[in-house]
Image: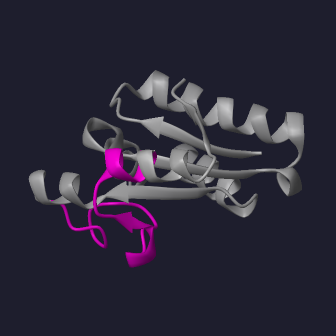
Amino acid sequence: HKVVYHLNSDDAKHQLAFMGNIQNHINAVGKDNLELRVVMHGPGITLLQNAKKDEDIRSRIDNLKMQGIIFNVCANTLTARKLNSKTDLYDVTQADIVPSGVAEIAILQSKGYAYIKP
């Protein structure tokens, strides 16, 4: 399975449920049968801001990353919100940053990724 999960909500309950959906997906098909990318833009980026100060969120993100999940962050959002990926967000490398979140979703869909927006 090749899947892109789209996150653009800053609602904390939604974000926790979102990560739960990803774990359920992994559990259903197995991490070795799944290539899953999370693309965050706009308010969705608050997941990684909140993770800086919330151990539970950090733990959930770390657990998903250990299972091969890739989290991508929109460069346009970083610029618009005047955020520094190294200091303002949890565990983001330069490789995690994509020029445009919505464009990245379209690119992934053109490569056969199924689109999911829980």
Asked if residue 54 can be seen in this view, the reply is: no
Q: Which of 95 and 105 is in front in this view?
A: 105
Count how many numbered circles sit on residues in the image: 0
Is residue 25 found inside the magenta-colored segment of the image? no
Q: In this view, does 103 lie to the left or right of 13?
A: left
Q: In which quarter of the image is residue 76?
A: bottom left
Question: Residue visible at 37% across and 57% down?
Answer: 73
Question: Residue visible at 36% across and 63% down?
Answer: 98
Question: Residue visible at 40% across and 53% down?
Answer: 104
Provide residue 53's location: percent of width, then percent of height.
39, 52
Is residue 89 found inside the magenta-colored segment of the image? yes
Q: Quadrant of residue 69?
A: bottom right
Which range of residues does the magenta coloring cover?
A: 83-105
Q: In this view, does 89 lie to the left or right of 37?
A: left
Asked if residue 30 can be seen in this view, the reply is: yes
Q: Seen from this angle, which residue lies furthest front?
A: 110
Q: In which quarter of the image is the N terminus?
A: top right
Provide residue 12's location: percent of width, then percent of height.
41, 28
Q: In which quarter of the image is the C terminus?
A: top right
Question: Residue visible at 44% across and 75% down?
Answer: 95
Q: In this view, does 71 lie above or below 25?
A: below
Provide residue 112's location: percent of width, then percent of height.
63, 47
Provide residue 6's location: percent of width, then percent of height.
47, 37
Q: In this view, does 77 lie to the left or right of 105?
A: left
* Colour basis: one colour
Q: In this view, does 107 lie above or below 99?
A: above
